[in-house]
Image (cartoon, rainbow, N blue to C red):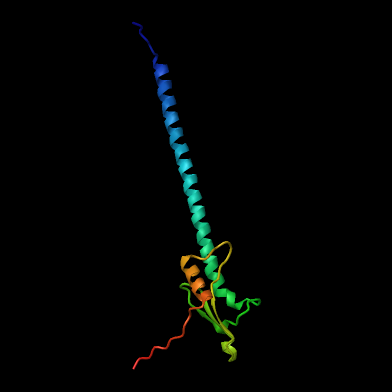
Amino acid sequence: MQHFSLSLAAVAAAVFLALVALIAGFFIGRMARHRHISAERKDAIKRSEAVILGAVYEKVLPFLPEFPYAPKDMVFIGKGFDYLVLDGLSEGSLRKIVFLEVKSGGSRLNANEKMISAVVQDGPIEWEEYRIS
């Protein structure tokens, strides 16, 4: 049977290297986690900025010079679609009624907006009057 004899210096060096490896692993793991969290935060911030910018566009759009409808003819709805445009009503001559959805960048219609668009384009739209006695 062989006997191994390690010096105190060798044991101390081994313990020191193990501690250095443990500490280095800890900090490398923290940095990797920080990078992952940072990427998620950047993505969340980017999406949040897009939503905020879209909301600003919705409110400013009617006042842009190249916009085809008069701001007075627009009623903000905001749920299902952004505006109901009563084109020409402010001039006393209603030309058409437009369901207007404002989008910016690469945003697309959501499921509800697609359904509303399909119904408006297919034409089953009615006028109803509800009277309270």
Location of residue 74 by image quarter: bottom right
Q: Residue most toward the right?
A: 66
Residue 3 percent coordinates (x, y): 35, 8
Q: Which residue lies at the image location 36% right of the left edge and 6% below the top edge?
A: 2
- Front residue of 41 and 6: 41
Front residue (pair 99, 61): 99
Q: Residue at x 45, y 41 (%)?
A: 30
- Relative to 110, is 88 above or below? below
Q: Position of residue 48 (x, y in %)?
A: 50, 61
Nearer to us in this view, 118 or 87? 118
Q: Is residue 101 above or below residue 106?
A: below
Q: Residue 104 lies in what quarter of the image?
A: bottom right
Q: Quadrant of the C terminus?
A: bottom left
Q: Is residue 57 left or right of residue 132?
A: right
Compared to residue 10, the image places residue 28 above or below, namely below
Question: Split into 4 quadrants, where in the image is the N terminus?
Answer: top left
Q: Position of residue 40 (x, y in %)?
A: 48, 51
Residue drawn 46% across the image and 43% down it: 33
Q: Quadrant of residue 131?
A: bottom left
Image height check: is 3 above or below 93?
Answer: above
